[in-house]
Image: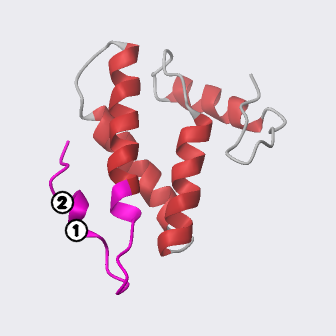
Amino acid sequence: MNAPTPDGDRHDGRLDDLSRRLTQALQILDLEVDYPLLLGLAAETTRAVGPDGGPISTFLVGYAAGMTSTSDKQSVSDAVERAVDVARQANRKTGDGGIDDGWANTAQ
């Protein structure tokens, strides 16, 4: 499986192993993790707000997607993509250093 990262690098299976262990432990066996999407968001957020932003943004995306009550994989994928889009909008900064308020009306 060795998923590519946003910059095209391939991991030596560590992400696959981690994902497999966590999905089993959390009993979410049918979850497919979109590594490039989540790693891309984490990298963008890190650039926008600093190193702590990446993990926080991906956690919040996962939480928002999880709030979508469905058992359909495609719907979960759609929920993750939607949450990532919202998070990316929130990462955009205005010229004065503040967070762009254009994302305020994008609640899940």
Residue 101 numbered mark, or none? 1
Residue 104 numbered mark, or none? 2
Left or right, 75 with respect to 106, comes to right
Residue 43 point in image, percent of width and height: 59, 58
Q: Is residue 75 magenta?
A: no
Give the farthest residue toward the bottom: 96
Q: Residue at x 49, y 71 (%)?
A: 48
Residue type, mark 1 in image:
Asp
Residue 104 point in image, percent of width and height: 18, 60
Left or right, 21 with respect to 53, comes to right
Left or right, 76 with respect to 10, comes to left
Our reading of the magenta stretch's main secondary structure is loop
Q: Residue at x 44, y 59 (%)?
A: 56
Task: Name the image quarter holding residue 34.
Answer: top right
Q: Range of the magenta residues?
A: 89-108
Most foreground residue, 36 or 73? 36
Q: Are marks 1 and 2 in contact (CB under 8 Å)?
A: yes
Report crowding for label 1: few under 14, some 14 to 19, many 20 or more residues within 10 A (C-alpha): few
Query: Which quadrant, please, contains the C terminus?
Result: top left
Circle 1 SS class = helix
Most foreground residue, 85 or 52? 85
